[in-house]
Every structure is written in C-alpha cells, then in structure tokens.
Amino acid sequence: MEEIVFPNQIRINRKMRGVSMQDLADRLGISLSAISKIEKGYRRLNQEQLILVAEILDCSLQDLYVNEQNSQHEVVMSWKKEQERRQEINRNSGLKVLGAALRYIRNEKSLTLIEVAENADMTLSVYHRIEMGQREVSDKEYKNIANALGMDVDALKAEIKRLDEKGALEEIIAHNDTKYKIAAISRPVNDHNGSGYIDLDTLKVPVFGASGADGSIVIDRNSSSKEAVKPANLCDKRDVYGVSLCTRRLGSILSNRAIMFVAPSEVASVGDIALYYTTEQKAFVVSVREDETGQLYGLMWNPEERIYFSNDDFKKIHKVVDIAL
C-alpha cells in the first residue's frame, strides 16, 4: 500500500504555467516517474528541490503546499477524501489493531516512543505512524519491534490477538482516529514522552533573526522576539532553534513570515539548506554544493554567489532541518 507523505499543488501550478512533466523532471534531474509520484504525494522532495520547483514555476513555496488557507476547495476536499479512504484501508487491513496493541504494550512496559523506535532501528516518525495504524510493517520490522518490546514474534502476535479479543484496544483506536482526522487538516505533532499527551511548552523554541546588510540575517541569541512550536519530526532534537526568514536574497520564493528550524548538531551535506555564520551574529542562507573538484561551497541567491568552505568552517554551518510557512 502506498502512503501519501507530501500533499502538494505542484501539478496545478505546473499546468497553470504551461510546464510539462518532462520539462520539470529534466530541470530537477529526476525521472518522469519520480515527478508523477511527487505530484501524487507518494514521494518527497528535499528542501533544495522544493526551492528549485518554486523557481521553475515562478511561485512561492507556500503555493506548493495544500492547506485550507491557500488551496482551492476541491483540492482540500480531494486530499481529505484520500486521507479518509486510506484510513478505511488501514482499518480493514488490521493496521489500527496492530498500532493500538503496540501502544498498549509499550505503555505497559513503561517504554517511550523514542526508546522503542531506536531499539527497533526506526526513526521516531516511522514508528509513530505504525502505532497510529497509518503504516504497514514488514516481517523484518515486526521482528525488530518485538525485540524492542522484549518479546519474540510469536509472543507479540499472541498478545495482540488477546488484547483485541478482550476489547482492550477500542479506546486507543478511537483516540488514534481522532488524532488522524485532526492531522488531515493540520500538521501532526507527535508526543515524545510516551504518555500520549503533548506539553507544548517543551516543544517551543526561541525564534531569532533581523534583516542585516547584503541579505544577511542578524541573530542575537540574547534577544528572541517570539517562540515557535517545533515540527513533529524534530521533537526529540534538543538543540533546535528558529530563525525568521527575513533575508531578501530569496526574493519571493519564501514568505518573510516563514520560520527556519535549525539544528547545529546536524551535519549539512550536499543538497541541504543551511545557515553559514560569517560572525557570531551574522549568517547567510546557503545551499550546500560541491564543485567539479570536490570542494564544498555555499550557494547564495539574488545574485548568485559562492562561499567556499574551509576545514575550519564546518562549525559555522548550521543545517536547516525544516521550514514552517
């Protein structure tokens, strides 16, 4: 079963501007099949690719996302209908029972989502979707989850069957259904303490940034004008901070209301967006690139400009791990 992971309006914007799927695929350097999956929401684009799509289609990033504020009514309703259809598929295939049972057993063993995810060799977001009944599980993943819960596969299957027959999972399934319906119209937030409840204060991060000279961003860590809630996939990252996208070097691609979430401990690699600090309080938004000699550099826009990195510069490069519009 394919799982929609990135609802978007790329196809609508592409057709409005007379750009063919093949042309978009060629300019992104990916296959026609990949573009089809991207437009249907079955495949994600990374941040640099999203920015490139916005440049090619001459629109803002916000125009590419589906939400009730900026999308046509029929697009929003189509997305909701697709979510409901897949919810029913999940129910019929028993994924909801599996997810609810895993949550029940995990809580009984006083384990957190993070502990089980790490011990099962999964990301937190993937394991969370399994507990929500929104993702199928392979035989290998099932075995890894069983081991993470301190059980063998047969014992786990027997316990799931027992809990289902006992009726112990109905409340959890109903709770997951409610969270799923909310997620269909807003961005989901995962609990990170295993309790099933969210303490928003623990998810808030300071937001810095004022417009500087030459398209730079001035970041004063001693002065934060506001706070923002971390996206769900970053809830376990403790060093994340927010930066207002107040630079003019990106033109109209991104709204100046957008917030970049930055993780200094994350290693930025080729294709990533990052903040490059030229001083302790002055940074530029760059795309990490590699030239023909293998030398890494940061590409800035409007106008295009390269900043080559030295071996001592990597502590000055903070990876942008998410952007909230």
Image (tube, rainbow, N blue to C red):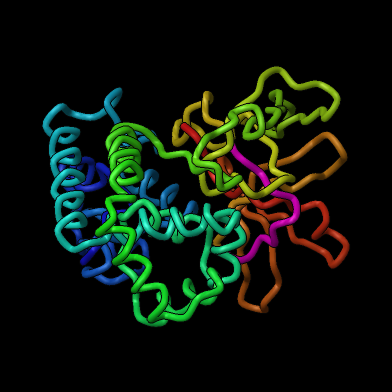
**Residue 41, located in which quarter of the rendered image?**
bottom left
Q: Which is nearer the eye, 64 or 130? A: 130
Q: Main secondary structure of the magenta part?
A: loop
Numbered range of the magenta stretch: 260-270
**Direction from residue 96 to residue 132 in the image, left or right:** right
Q: Nearer the viewer, residue 312 or 127?
A: 127
- Residue 289 seen in the current view: yes
Tell me what residue is drawn at x 23 percent, y 29 percent. Answer: 71
Viewer-proximal residue among 83 and 173: 173
Q: Position of residue 305 (x, y in %)?
A: 64, 50
Task: Residue at 38%, 81% (x, y): give it.
Answer: 154
Quadrant of the image occupied by residue 75: top left
Left or right of 49 in this view: 271: right
Residue found 45% across the figure and 31% down from its top: 252
The reply to whether residue 24 is in sight is no
Of residues 11 and 73, which is closer to you in this image?
73
106, above or below 176, in the image: below
What is the x, y in percent for residue 172? 35, 44
| Figure label count | 0
Q: Name the side, left or right, on which 241 lies relative to 24.
A: right
Q: Position of residue 195 (x, y in %)?
A: 55, 42
Residue projecting furthest to the front: 166
Q: Is residue 117 above or below residue 256?
A: below
User: In the displayed structure, would residue 160 be above or below residue 96?
Assistant: below
Q: Is residue 272 magenta?
A: no
Which quadrant holds the N terminus? bottom left
